[in-house]
Amino acid sequence: KLQFKSLQSQINPHFLSNPLNTLKWLASIQNAKNIEELASALIDIINQAMGKGGEWTSIDKEINVLKSYITVQSYRYFDKFRVIFEVEDDILKYSIPKFLIQPILENAIIHGTMDIDHLLTIIVKGFMGKDDVITLSIMDDGCGIDQQKLETILCNLDNRCKNPAFNSIGLSNVNERIKLFYGDSYGLTVNSIKNVFTKVEIFFPKKIN
């Protein structure tokens, strides 16, 4: 919590969002639609990061900011990927720690687009399962993870080994945050087959703030 507060104090949202709003206005009057769209997406991300609610947001808002993040990355990667959302409406009202899904999606985009000759497809699913446990999954049809590296990643997530060469900071951070907020019974799992797919599933109980 102290680390989160420290990050908030270091970045004044008005310092960032006000120039971006100016950039968006200038792009609009000059009919630069791409710059206007990019600025709008960045404003949405900043507002989510520094807005009200502390560490928490709704799944609905998290999905919306995820779409803004996708807009930013689409310009960076020149439309090398597409994202399909299959999230049940019934779970959108429940709370989730902010930016819980974004690091997983970022991994999918960065690593999934490597060494492939097709458009990367990423599917984001969300549904309510048994015992009111919500599952959010991010699956891509990219380059996948070889078995040795996958075993090391899973080992790191279970805190059974530490190998910086294969340690995934994004996955570990999400896993630790879930356990911190919800308990050790929850977290994430990773499944992958090299050159076929990678799937990350996040499990946590329903919660309304």
Image (tube, helix red, strand yellow):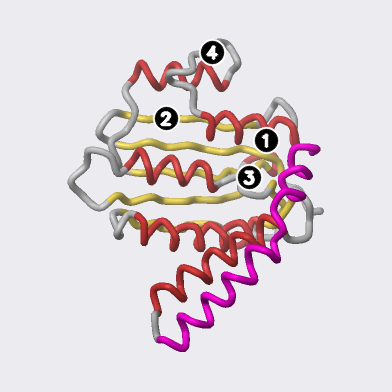
Residue type highlighted by circle 1: Ile
Residue 85 rendering spot, x and y as whole percentages: 46, 58
Alpha carbons under labels 4 and 1: distance apart:
20 Å
Q: Considering the numbered disc 2 on the image, is that residue within a helix, a strand or a loop?
A: strand
For label 2, the residue is 191
Alpha carbons under labels 3 and 4: distance apart:
29 Å
Which range of residues does the magenta coloring cover?
1-30
Residue type highlighted by circle 3: Ile
Q: Considering the numbered disc 1 on the image, is that residue within a helix, a strand or a loop?
A: helix
Which residue appears at 52% of the width and 75% of the height? 23
Query: To which quarter of the image does residue 150 belong?
Result: top left
Q: Residues within 10 Å of mark 2 (few under 14, many from 20)?
A: some
Residue 76 rendering spot, x and y as whole percentages: 36, 56
For label 4, the residue is 162
89, 144: nearer the viewer = 144
Circle nearer the N terminus (3, 4): 3
State whether the magenta stretch is mostly helix, strand or loop.
helix
Circle nearer the N terminus (2, 1): 1
- Quick check: is 24 in the magenta stretch? yes
Circle nearer the N terminus (2, 3): 3
Q: Are marks 3 and 4 in contact (CB under 8 Å)?
A: no
Residue type highlighted by circle 4: Lys
Q: Is residue 28 left or right of residue 2?
A: left
Which residue appears at 52% of the width and 77% of the height? 24
Q: Which mark is nearer the camera, 4 or 1?
A: 4
For label 3, the residue is 134
For label 1, the residue is 178
